[in-house]
Amino acid sequence: MNAPYEIDYETIFRFAPVGMCISVNRVIQSSNDALTSMFGYPHGALDGESFQRLYPTVDEFLRTGHRIIPIMNTRGRYSDERIMRRANGELFWCHVTGRALDPQEPLGAGVWTFEDVSEKRPVSAELTPREREIAAFLVEGKTSKVIARETDLSPRTVEMHRAKLMRKFGAATSSELVHKLMGVTR
């Protein structure tokens, strides 16, 4: 029999095939090679940086932070797919999952994973920050009423953004729009 390997958590973290980081109050304390590579930064360049650096706009960073808190308080973890920004400015779809180390501090110390899903879901239209936010909710299968409640917008305003997205993506129905947002060809 072979001798068991000694578990080296630092090596596991650094070479994990998915982007990972440890954060405190939305500031990256330590990131692995997959994360920095995914976002187009050299090794260690994101350590000590705010997550804000990875968002297309400051407003999207702030709105996401406000949305995360009640969900983390309820579930203890958070997960979504959203459009993020690489170092070169390129926008891409990213699946993000996080968990607070202390459930009483949802944005305190936490572990986050990031997966680039742009091959399955390319960003194919120029979208405003609000349209990106609405698109992310639509991909999650949320209705206009639910999106309105979670974004403090009126259902009519959400419908207006949905209509703009449908025009930009050349979708005839809401279902077709969601398929196009998800990169599903029919």
Image: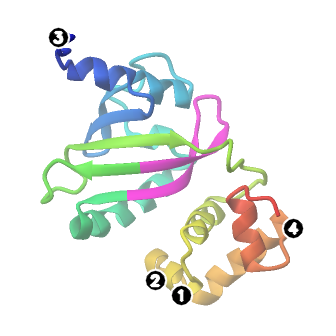
Q: Which residue is mark 2?
A: 149
Q: Are marks 1 and 3 in contact (CB under 8 Å)?
A: no
Image coords of residue 113 (percent x, y): 39, 41
Disc 2/disc 4 C-alpha distance (Å): 27 Å
Image coords of residue 126 (percent x, y): 76, 53
Report the residue that reaches farthest toward the top.
2
Most common SS among magenta residues: strand
Is 107 within the magenta? no
- Which amino acid is tagged 2? Arg
Q: Quadrant of the N terminus?
A: top left
Which of marks 4 and 1 precedes in the sequence?
Answer: 1
Report the residue that reaches farthest toward the front.
1
Describe the element under mark 1 as helix, strand or loop.
Answer: helix
**Category of crowding for the residue at label 3, using alpha-carbon neighbours closer than 10 angstroms: few (below 14), some (14–19), many (at least 20):** few
Q: Are marks 3 and 4 in contact (CB under 8 Å)?
A: no
**99 to 142, vertically: above or below:** above
* 70 to the left or right of 86: left
Q: Are marks 2 and 4 in contact (CB under 8 Å)?
A: no
Q: Which residue is mark 3?
A: 3
Q: Quadrant of residue 137?
A: bottom right
The one nearer the camera, 56 or 124, is 124
Image coords of residue 77 (percent x, y): 28, 58
Q: Quadrant of residue 23?
A: top left
Is 86 within the magenta? yes
Q: Which residue is mark 4?
A: 170
Which stretch did the figure color magenta? 79-96
Disc 1/disc 3 C-alpha distance (Å): 58 Å
Which residue does the image show at 71% across and 58% down from the upper left? 127
Q: Which residue is mark 1?
A: 145
Q: Quadrant of residue 175?
A: bottom right
**Category of crowding for the residue at label 2, using alpha-carbon neighbours closer than 10 angstroms: few (below 14), some (14–19), many (at least 20):** few
- Which amino acid is tagged 3? Ala
